[in-house]
Amino acid sequence: MISASGRYVIVFNGEVYNFEEIRAELGTCGWRGHSDTEVLLESVERWGLGQAVRRFVGMFAFALWDRRERKLFLVRDRLGIKPLYYGRIGQDFVFASELKAIEQHPDFDGQVDRDALALYMRHSYVPAPHCIYRGIFKLMPGCILTLNSSLEEPSAQPFWSVREVAQEGIRSRFKGSDEQAIEQLESKLVEAVRLRMVADVPLGAFLSGGIDSSTVVALMQAQSNRPVKTFSIGYHEDAYNEAGHAKKIAAHLGTEHTELYLTPKDAREVIPRLAEMYDEPFADPSQIPTYLVSKLARSRVTVSLSGDGGDELFGGYNRYLAARSIWNAVKRLPQISRKPAAKMIQAVPAKAIDRAFEALRLLLPKRMQMSRPGERAHSLADYLATETRQGIYMRIISHWQTPSSLVLHSHEPGSVLESLDSLSGIGCFEEFMMLVDLVNYLPDDVLTKVDRASMAVGLEARVPLLDHRVVEFAWKLPLRFKIRNNAGKWVLRQLLYRYVPRELVERPKRGFDLPLDSWLRGELRDWAEELLSETSLRQPGIFQVEPIRRKWQEHMSGKQGWQYLLWDVLVFQAWYAKKSNFVKAARPSAVATGIPRFTAG
């Protein structure tokens, strides 16, 4: 779209939810239509890009060309809900919402960035600003990239920073009572949900039955004069199935509920689409149920609200409690004795520890009887050798612990580790972990998963918990409003209890998980064996084959559950095969790659 003055041209992906409010503030501008895109352009004309974008409530990625100044601006929303890639191909500067658009450039050579691949093997996604292709990057959330001329390198500056929001929230803590915290959170979430329910197309919501999605659906139904359409995924394996809980919550709230029970066959049919859907290797296994629930929702609605963001904002992940316990245990040992103790444990083979525990099983108290004690002891040794809390958390969030030794000729960039170090002084340990996830895991895993899965079926997914005003309020809340009595999301739970009985939502956390371990030994075995065969692994010359084959054999024997590490490899192998027409497994150049440096947040 071209602005009314003719100065600006925009290409826009996303939604500005408060555009009607901004339109009213702008007054009479000779409006040509009723879209948020026109309001966005006129906001830039009136206030300038920096001031305008700070007024926007929404999810967006856009390119803005200033015809008068001959400048290009790329802008990505505060939390990274919408994607934006950019880079150079020859003399051309390219940008797009999807890599598959950039792949169409006639000079695109698709060289795999092995350093980025090492990052992927650690995290199961490629963290920003990196990309699986050399020379292509992701714009960081909350940033404006400026290109002044075709000869210069672009520069990026934040217009909103998660790190600064966290620091400001900790400096100016909320001092009210429990009841006041619940009231204020409810007020902000009601408004966030209300804005995202404005649509001229059919609208619904994902409902897993957990705290986050149930809260969003409850607030939707409270503001709707007809039953909200809700959608859920179930499994025939009881250990993974939450559809029954979601159904009870839907019945209580009075929604129009639809559910789909998945089978391994359903998953198998989605797998060939993953490479096309995600463009990069992306190995969060819940990508499959997320795609299928999106497809289910799209059959009835065009827009669906989701509950993503609650874990990172309100301390919902179990790993926050686990990491705190591990760090407290490690701190009890004098630092000088930790590494020697770790070496002593590691010197004893895991199988020998297993045999010792088996021999003593009848003599040990019940709390000390455990499965795979050797593996657990070696894991404890690894934590003992870690000297900092950020090191503990890095280990917890890592899949393959030494990816550079697995990906041949690679050197893992320190971007995530640098992010951890730069954030280490902010808040207590639990707040530090939530901030790390908000900067890294949320945009590069959770939001990537939902955006690509929903867009693949033409469904627009909206995330009210990530309204930036909710994020800013959440960071003002002291930790006791988030984690209390060894359970996360305290304040969110209290809000939900106003709409749903406590007994319907109080149960162990699961999310959109799936029984990948048994599926790889069963219905997905032939597909996995083909991709993990020695021939398939050696052919591209990318991986150290032996560790992968060993883990596959141990998984198949039932000795270990390596499904998540193997899924990382399987997804890459399937992606590489799909993209093989133009992908090159190039070794890293000795020349610096010129990756832009960004500070965390």
Image (cartoon, rainbow, N blue to C red):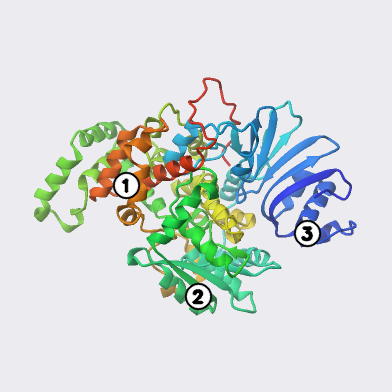
The secondary structure type at the circle numbered 1 is loop
The secondary structure type at the circle numbered 2 is helix
Q: Are marks 1 and 3 in contact (CB under 8 Å)?
A: no
**Of discs 3 and 2, which sits in the foreground?**
3
Q: Earlier in the sequence, mark 3 or mark 2?
A: 3
What distance separates the C-alpha of mark 1 from that of mark 2? Answer: 35 Å
- Disc 2 target residue: 250
Label 2 crowd bin: few (<14), some (14–19), many (20+), radius 10 Å: many
Question: Residue 402 location, x and y as percent?
Answer: 37, 34
Residue 335 relative to residue 136: left or right: left
- Disc 3 target residue: 35
Most extreme residue toward the top, as rendered?
590
Question: Residue 21 location, x and y as percent?
Answer: 77, 61
Residue 8 found in image quarter = top right
Query: In the figure, 526 relative to 151: above or below?
Result: below
Label 3 crowd bin: few (<14), some (14–19), many (20+), radius 10 Å: some
Question: Residue 257 location, x and y as percent?
Answer: 52, 75
